Amino acid sequence: MTGSLTAKKTPFCILGIESSCDETAAAIVASDKVIHANIIASSSALHAQHGGVVPEIAARAHLDTLAPVITKAFTESGLSWDDIDGVAATGGPGLIGGVLVGTVAAKAMARFHDKPYFAINHLEGHALTARLTNDTPFPYLLLLVSGGHTQLLLVRDVGQYERVGTTMDDAAGELFDKAAKILGLGYPGGPALEQAAKDGDPKAVKLPRPLKGADHAHFSFSGLKTAIAQQIEKHGTKMSVADYAASLQAAITDCLADRVRHAIAYAMTDEAFAAHPQLVVAGGVAANQAIAAALDTLCHETGCRLVVPPPHLCTDNAAMIAWAGVEYFARGEASSTDFAPRPRWPLDDNAAPPPGRGVRP
Ligand code: KG4
Ligand code: ZN
């Protein structure tokens, strides 16, 4: 971020735009934490028949939907451009077509209305949401579990993130979605698989716990995807969909809890964290009740405060982007309109790669 600015009024208001995946969203959030509007249009139905997000379809949907979504944010809030003090948009990481649509729109509106522009890292939006919803003070450990990301970040301040763990392959939500597809449960698979798991036996199908007990806090889910596919091929209809779903959900939950336990132990070596340990959970997978219960137990055992923002602010939304804009505005830091969208944009540039193959941004 560059430049310097001061608010002309308090509270000040930021218009936020999110368009990095399949949600086209606009929100208006004030510095006193009032969410004046939070509008989301999802193109997920258009992707359902493909079993996953199709980038070209998503980009076109953003183009068609962004202007009406922004108009709706103004209409619902009853605010006008005179009330807006800055425009924030997701600048990455994400699908480049969508990020481009949001970035170009935000820059054009900011320039036309003579407001500062903020290019926001989507992950930073997730990382700072707990400050909007739960007044969470720094530092805290963040578990971000979505369809695109599975990361553990030590959040020390705005712009100060230490990546403690990340996935070496698939994200946890991606595994839910892929397994649900194999089981014929539809897309997005997470909620459907959780529902199916309710009637199943979590011990029925033998599945591995990749990286459990490993001396780091990274994740790996691709082995579980192969394992569940092999088990389905082996046992077919001799086992119920409910048993497959419950067993997979239990394996994912075990892996997540084990990796978070390791990350908490690491974070406890940080004096400020140890003085007031907090775990914040964000991302669509956080809505899963079995996972939430396991993290709750873990926090009790380790003396951590567990913070889970409301589900509609845990999944992709523009209020989190507007709020990150508020945080940067308050620090007097705006972005240059020369900012180029970043399909890959790690929050921690110094993060060492985990042992293994690729690393997600
Ligand atoms: O954060 P999100 O809305 O979008 C991004 O991926 O960025 O997360 C969506 C992911 C999908 O993979 C979806 O299957 C998963 O979150 N999900 C769940 C549940 N609800 C959503 N996974 C497990 N259990 C759920 N109840
Ligand atoms: Zn997200």
Image (cartoon, helix red, strand yellow):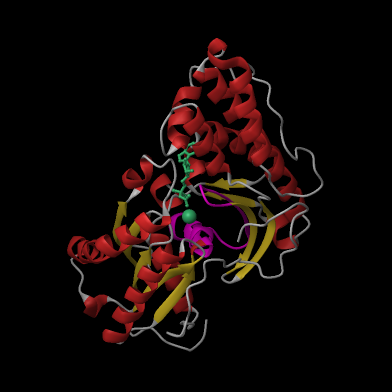
Residue 120 visible from this viewpoint: yes
* Residue 121, image x, y percentages: 51, 67
Residue 11 visible: no
Specify start and end residues of the magenta stretch as a single range. Answer: 123-149
- Residue 46 counted in the magenta span: no
In-image side of 113 versus 143 (left or right): left
Q: Is residue 201 above or below residue 221?
A: above
Residue situated furthest right in the rendering: 215
176 or 270, which lies in front? 176
- The residue drawn where x is 51% and y is 30% is 182
**In which quadrant of the rendered view does residue 80 lie?**
bottom left
Judged left or right of residue 39, residue 162 is right
Residue located at (21% from left, 61% from top): 72
| For residue 142, above or below residue 86 | above
Q: Is residue 17 above or below residue 145?
A: below
State the residue at coordinates (71%, 39%): 258
Q: Quadrant of the C terminus?
A: bottom right
- 134 is within the stretch colored magenta: yes
Residue at image position (49%, 82%) is 333
Residue 66: percent from left, percent from top: 28, 64
Q: Could you say where residue 112 lies in the image, as x and y percent from the top left?
A: 27, 85
Q: Nearer the viewer, residue 106 or 318?
A: 106
Image label count: 0
> Furthest-top residue in view?
238
Where residue 51 appears, as percent x and y from the top left, is 43, 40
